[in-house]
């Protein structure tokens, strides 16, 4: 017998691994079976939606991850997660039902928890054990599950009276923080004797001690970040890109960094598409293949005319040329940029250029094992970890196909076919939900909800499709409009925009920033998009108000010693810095935020000229 409930409970309590009930407790290896040590405690908030946790940088998805057999246990009844080191800290369904681990045979057949083998996966240690026989299973076993990669250690949470504990290094003790929310003002001085290593991080302090942060209309403050939300639902053409058509658009997960390629080079933006800079590679090239890492740092493009691939690792500032000879049509990459793929436009005969793949951030490229009959390769996309990869093709005399790999492109199999062929393809971060456009002149949306194994013809007309990382938001191009679903494609909203022959779409991971490229123009929808920046604090902080929300009017001042205080009124001459003690509105990048004489919060994307300048935030009375 591999394990028993009694044996497991005892070994877990004494911090021992459970691999077999045939082993005495002293034969098992000690491990972190219970999360109690301060440096083992998970301190980041875990969303109940796994894909959101991935976006938040709290979780990583391991898809069909191969487990390693523990040969110290007989009858092949114990396995563990290993990738250079043992992989622990797997997230259980305690945090949401979608976190439950899924177990598979090597042939891809799922083994459900009700199976007679009575398998058990220990989320804390990453160990899989069986009670029953495993002889009938194809091995090695594989799992699809989420690992916690967020912060660990203590989080500075507030006491009942609003104070925050802090660590004093000379005595190695925690104290009630001198930072208070009551009327007593006490300084925090990180240079005071004995406190040189004061552990007081803005990343651990939620403003106002509110888990969701503090918001004034569309302006939010949380931890060490400020955020401005836009709720405009219209589509606009960037002022710097009039009458310009683009072939492909890619963006970072938050939509802040955007790159667009055209018949005449490339353009990029680092502020959500507000401002644009022209291409920095060479003039006159036509680009179609384009992919970007989730942070926008790694970018890869493929040329349609000179057959070369270009790779950047510095947000598109410099590019390394990779010499190949093909008409590159589409590109994809994992969220970290490690795994990449570029596909040619067509494969006419064996020996033609085929799908090229890289597993070292675009340094080296090798042909994929995928071979196809004569077909036009219309799109390729991969999951955030790069493990699941899908290619859509258009027929040249036969059928078009959807080819999918579940092992980083090592092996491939066709999952759908159509005499009309397939065009553009998209998938969620975990690869579970996929969407593709079938057809040429008459195009229909197809959707899969099981990693591309089975496909459903929705009957909905569409030219292109994009899916948010969690699959909740789908956007399709339909003639001269964009149509959006916010419930996984169950229902669709009205047509948005009035474009001219929409060709391609792009969307941020959360689906809140959307781009549509027509023949002659780019259109951007900033609905619910966000502009973010860091809050930089002085080394001394003083609070003199009971709560941040009490600042219905007035200003925050900083004196020559770096002490922040609040005042009921401040002359505008002080705010502009013309006279007085250099008091200014709160600056956030190029934005200025202040409260006017009537107590209304105002915002302007440049220095204000008077206290009544700028825009009133939110729905405050005027």
Image (cartoon, helix red, strand yellow):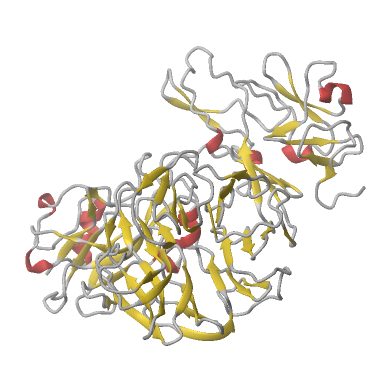
Vertical order, 595 against 194 (above or below) = below
Of all residues shown, which one is farthest toward the top? 193
Q: Nearer the viewer, residue 294 or 298?
A: 298
Residue occupying image coordinates x 81% and y 50%: 618
Please give the name of the residue rendered at 41% of the width and 62% of the height, measured from the top-left corner.
327
The one of 512 and 602 positioned closer to us in this rendering? 512
Residue 382 in the image: x percent, y percent? 40, 63
Q: Quadrant of residue 249?
A: bottom right
Give x and y (percent) for residue 282.
50, 44
Mark yes or no: residue 602 visible: yes
Whether residue 92 is visible, yes or no, is no
Q: Position of residue 16 (x, y in %)?
A: 20, 51
- Front residue of 253 and 73: 253
Up/down of 559 relative to 601, above or below: above
Of residue 242 and residue 472, the one placed in the foreground of this image is: 242
Among the 4 quarters of the image, the one containing residue 120: bottom left
């Amino acid at each position: 017998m591999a394990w028993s409930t009694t044996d497991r409970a005892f070994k877990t309590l004494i911090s021992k691994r459970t691999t077999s009930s045939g082993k005495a407790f002293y034969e098992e290896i000690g491990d972190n079976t219970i999360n109690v040590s301060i440096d083992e405690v998970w301190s980041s908030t875990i969303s109940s939606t796994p894909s959101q946790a991935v976006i938040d940088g709290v979780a990583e998805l391991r898809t069909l991850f191969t487990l390693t057999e523990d040969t110290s246990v007989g009858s092949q009844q114990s396995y563990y997660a290993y990738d250079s080191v043992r992989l622990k800290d797997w997230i259980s369904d305690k945090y949401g039902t979608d976190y439950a681990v899924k177990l598979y045979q090597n042939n891809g057949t799922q083994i459900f928890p009700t199976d007679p083998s009575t398998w058990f996966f220990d989320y804390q240690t990453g160990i899989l054990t069986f009670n029953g026989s495993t002889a009938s299973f194809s091995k090695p076993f594989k799992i699809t599950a989420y690992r916690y990669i967020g912060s660990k250690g203590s989080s500075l949470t507030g006491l009942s009276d609003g104070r925050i504990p802090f660590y004093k290094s000379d005595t190695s003790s925690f104290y009630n923080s001198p930072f208070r929310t009551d009327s007593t003002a006490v300084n925090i001085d990180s240079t005071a004797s004995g406190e040189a290593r004061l552990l007081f991080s803005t990343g651990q302090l939620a403003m106002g001690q509110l888990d969701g942060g503090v918001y004034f209309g569309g302006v939010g403050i949380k931890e060490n970040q400020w955020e401005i939300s836009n709720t405009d639902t219209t589509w606009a053409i960037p002022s710097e890109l009039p009458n310009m058509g683009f072939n492909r658009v890619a963006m970072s997960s938050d939509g802040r960094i955007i790159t667009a390629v055209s018949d005449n080079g490339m353009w990029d933006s680092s502020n959500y598409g507000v401002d644009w800079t022209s291409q920095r590679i060479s003039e006159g090239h036509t680009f179609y293949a384009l992919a970007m890492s989730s942070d926008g740092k790694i970018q890869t493009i493929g040329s349609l005319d000179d057959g070369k691939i270009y790779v950047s690792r510095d947000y598109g500032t410099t590019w390394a040329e990779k010499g190949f000879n093909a008409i590159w049509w589409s590109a994809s990459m994992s969220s970290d940029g490690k795994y990449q793929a570029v596909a040619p436009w067509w494969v006419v005969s064996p020996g033609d250029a085929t799908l090229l793949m890289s597993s070292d951030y675009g340094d080296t490229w090798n042909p994929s094992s995928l071979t196809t009959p004569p077909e036009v390769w219309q799109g390729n996309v991969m999951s955030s970890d790069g493990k699941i990869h899908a290619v859509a093709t258009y027929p040249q005399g036969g059928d078009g196909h959807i080819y999918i790999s579940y092992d980083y492109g090592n092996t491939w199999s066709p999952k759908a076919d159509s005499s009309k062929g397939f065009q553009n393809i998209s998938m969620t971060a975990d690869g579970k939900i996929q969407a593709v456009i079938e057809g040429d002149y008459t195009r229909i949306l197809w959707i899969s909800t099981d990693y591309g194994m089975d496909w459903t013809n929705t009957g909905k007309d569409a030219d292109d499709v994009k899916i948010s990382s969690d699959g909740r938001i789908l956007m399709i191009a339909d003639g001269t409009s964009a149509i959006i679903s916010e419930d996984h494609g169950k229902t669709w909203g009205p047509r948005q925009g009035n474009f001219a022959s929409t060709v391609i779409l792009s969307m941020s991971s959360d689906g809140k920033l959307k781009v549509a490229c027509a023949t002659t123009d780019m259109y951007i929808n900033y609905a619910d998009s966000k502009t973010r920046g860091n809050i930089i604090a002085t080394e001394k902080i003083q609070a003199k108000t009971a709560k941040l929300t009490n600042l219905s009017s007035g200003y925050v001042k900083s004196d020559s010693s770096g002490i922040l205080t609040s005042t009921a009124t401040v002359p505008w001459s002080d705010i502009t810095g013309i006279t007085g003690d250099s008091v200014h509105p709160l600056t956030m990048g190029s934005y200025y935020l202040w409260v006017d004489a009537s107590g209304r919060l105002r915002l302007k994307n440049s220095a204000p000229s008077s206290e009544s300048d700028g825009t009133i935030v939110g729905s405050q009375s005027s």
